Image (cartoon, helix red, strand yellow):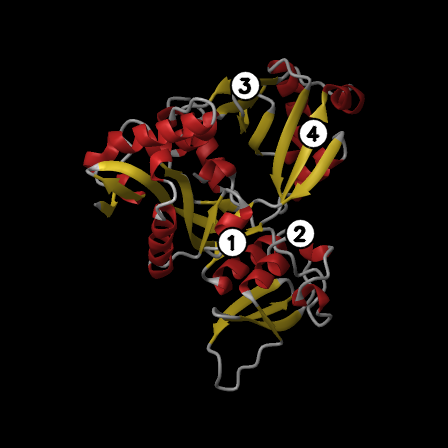
Amino acid sequence: MEQYVKGTPADAQDIVDFADFIFSKDAAPHDFSQMLPKLYGDGADTQQYHYLVKEDGRIKAMVCVLPVHLNVAGIELKLACIGTVSVHPRARGKGYMKKLMSMAIEDIQSEGYSFSLLGGQRQRYEYFGYEPAGIKLNFTLTEDNIRHKYGGLDASGISFEPLSSNSSQFDDAHQLYEQGIVSGARSKEQFASILRSWHIKPLVILHHHKFVGYVAISKDGGNVHEIELVDPALLPIVCKALIAYKKLSVLHFTVPAYDRDKISLLGDASEFYSTSYDHNYMILDYALVIEAFMKCKARNVKLQDGRFVIGIEGSDVVEIVVQDNQVVVNKLTEGAGIQADLWLSKREAMSGIFSSLSEFANWNSLSRNTNIPQGWFPLPLYVPPVDGC
């Protein structure tokens, strides 16, 4: 007889062992205690975030829902990150995953979450209300680009040191993170551990022995998942120093759409660039998420003045007002004289408000509506990769 339960401290080792077994069987060997120390490392008290199916006391399926608290442009958002979705090979076809996902989403909807994200096959999770959304830019910077574009720059003063909780620059790095337009997900106690997610290696960046930033790079050094600098103008010499320090021929950067300084500098030198969606998202509080990422966008873009009311079927009616680049978003009660300028399905809302496809495709109502003030959408929805699971 199967049991559907939430994890307890007694399940700690079984949860890690089950994740290691399933993902190692389907792909390369996995060690979740090293790959996601914030969730599965020594002392991580996160068992209660796991939805489990047990047969005769043994785990047969699992879903993790990690709560993450974000500050986006001064707005507090509660994010549900879904991960470690796994079913034992001999338990597949029993409907365990569908039931666990339904249980998890029911709790997400009732516990005040603003939005949720996960990775995985699109149609599998469309069933539960998730859609590809968010915007990120990918840049490829080669050693040839650096030689031709940055050849005359002196990067000799840049050096790197491992970033850990014992680093003398640890407090500076955490403070720099907290000053970002998207922050709040990493307490000082968890900062170094979170930056080591997915085998990422965090480094302190020094300029003439003075702290100027930090960078989170992949194990092989080729992928820059996050880089924060006290002065964005230092990015060219940091790139020049980093590619030499790691003895690489190419660096790959992932940058959120709201980070215009990095986009401008990398776009001016990179060999290749592309735009892609970020994750599969589900929005629960449209008004709050729209307000947060619209204010985020207004930090870098002059938004056109205007008022527009969007109704989302089965969800919120949202009033958006922009005046002098100040954003006010209200959740309205349907009826009582309230009339939306446009009604959207949840799928149309995701693709139109939070996806770069809305700028090119003409297959939803939002992209065809000419009354929406120009430049409002899409919004730069993005969650840093180290904050997910």
**Residue highlighted by disc 1:** 126
In the picture provided, is 150 more to the left or to the right than 131? right
Type of the residue with mark 2: Ser
Earlier in the chain: of badge 3 and badge 1, it is 1
**Residue highlighted by disc 3:** 160
What is the quadrant of residue 187 in the picture?
Answer: top left
Residues under labels 2 and 4: Cα distance?
20 Å
Judge whether residue 55 can be spotted in this image: yes
What residue do we see at 48% from left, 61% from top?
Answer: 288
Earlier in the chain: of badge 1 and badge 4, it is 1
Residues packed near mark 1 inside 10 Å, few (<14), some (14 to 19) or many (20 plus): some
Residues packed near mark 3 inside 10 Å, few (<14), some (14 to 19) or many (20 plus): many
Earlier in the chain: of badge 2 and badge 1, it is 1
Closer to us: 354 or 190: 354
Earlier in the chain: of badge 2 and badge 4, it is 4
What residue do we see at 19% from left, 38% from top?
Answer: 56
Type of the residue with mark 3: Phe
**Residue highlighted by disc 4:** 140
Earlier in the chain: of badge 2 and badge 3, it is 3
**Residue highlighted by disc 2:** 356
Secondary structure, mark 3, is strand
Pointer 1 and pointer 4: residues touching (CB < 8 Å)? no
Secondary structure, mark 2, is helix
